[in-house]
Amino acid sequence: MDFLNGKIKTIYFKYLAAAFGSALITSIYSIVDMAMVGKYHGPDGSAALAVVMPVWNIIYSLGLLMGIGGSVLFSTTRGKAEGKEERSNEYFTASVIGSVILAVIVWLVIIFFDRPLLQMFGAADDLLPLAREYVAPVKFAVPLFLFNQMLAAYLRNDKNPGLATAAVLSGGIFNVFGDFFWTVLSLAAPNLYIHVFMSPTEEVLQIAPSIIRCYCISFLLLPLNIFSTYYFQAIMKPKDAFIVSVARGLVVSGIFIYLLPVVAGADAIWFAMPITELLVAVYVVYKMMQYTRGTAEERKVFA
């Protein structure tokens, strides 16, 4: 495919379809996994799987860390001038080496420290055996899963930062409107989700609807915040992408998870993520407006 002289529309939709298809398939099998475990093992199975999910998320994030950051530098270097293949290939090599190092570290941690790791993520004594049973297959797939995320970022790279930004923007807009639909559905029919993902007890049916309604509010701003990390990386603003990711996943969310139950009672913990997403979204919108104004001013100067 001719990236320089080919039709942008054709190139764009080809890569959009590939990216959307892979994301859709990943989402589908993740949902099916959760539903099957919940149906087979009931609430305990769903709880144990929720404890294991952070392990997958860490591996997934490390793969993206190596892949997305490196692929953006890779495409930017090649886009600046011809004859930069050797320099751009160095970024790919660095990503591979970094992935190997991270994969080995995570692999060793999961193999030898799975018990304290799962306990750190909230596995109680009654859930720990089931959680360790679920995490056992993960031990064999750590390097493959991490490399899959890293290589996918390079394979999806089209060597055109402008086109990559447009693809991220379009996907983000689609994600925003899609999440509004699922949020409304969650608010209107929370029991539907409960029965899909597990065979609930009476206690679960009593507490789950209110929890779902509280937590799903965060879905309104979640796609914007996730999309912003890719957007900032695409326009070469890795610092802002890092701030958004760490704020959502660790700093701001962690503060509210510990603070809200103390200040407003145990049930307030379910508002931790909605508040986190709101605060992060304020920062995201501010930075996007700042960069948009800066780009517009640069165009006026060169016009």
Image (cartoon, rainbow, N blue to C red):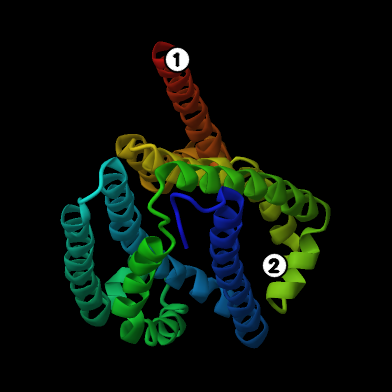
For image coordinates 25% across by 48% down, the residue present is: 82
| 137 left or right of 12 in image | left
Q: Position of residue 228 (x, y in %)?
A: 48, 40
| Residue type of the residue flagged with mark 2 | Val
Q: Nearer the viewer, residue 276 or 106?
A: 106
Instruction: Judge the density around disc 2: few (<14), some (14-19), many (≥20) Cα neighbours within 10 Å.
Output: some
Q: Furthest residue to the front?
A: 5
Q: Quadrant of residue 254?
A: top left
| 221 left or right of 61 in image | right
Q: Position of residue 182 (x, y in %)?
A: 73, 54
Q: Position of residue 143 (x, y in %)?
A: 29, 77
- Quick check: can you spot residue 121? no
Q: Which residue is mark 2?
A: 204
Q: Position of residue 227 (x, y in %)?
A: 51, 45
Q: How many marks?
A: 2
| Residue type of the residue flagged with mark 1 | Ala
Q: Nearer the viewer, residue 91 or 140?
A: 91
Q: Which residue is mark 1?
A: 303
Q: Nearer the viewer, residue 19 or 279?
A: 19
- Which type of secondary structure does the marked residue at label 2 adopt? helix
The C terminus lies in quadrant? top left
For image coordinates 41% across by 77% down, the residue present is: 125
In this view, 22 is above or below 171: below
For image coordinates 32% across by 55% down, the residue present is: 71
- Quick check: can you spot residue 181? yes
Q: Which circle marks residue 145 in the picture?
A: none
In this view, 176 is above or below 12: above
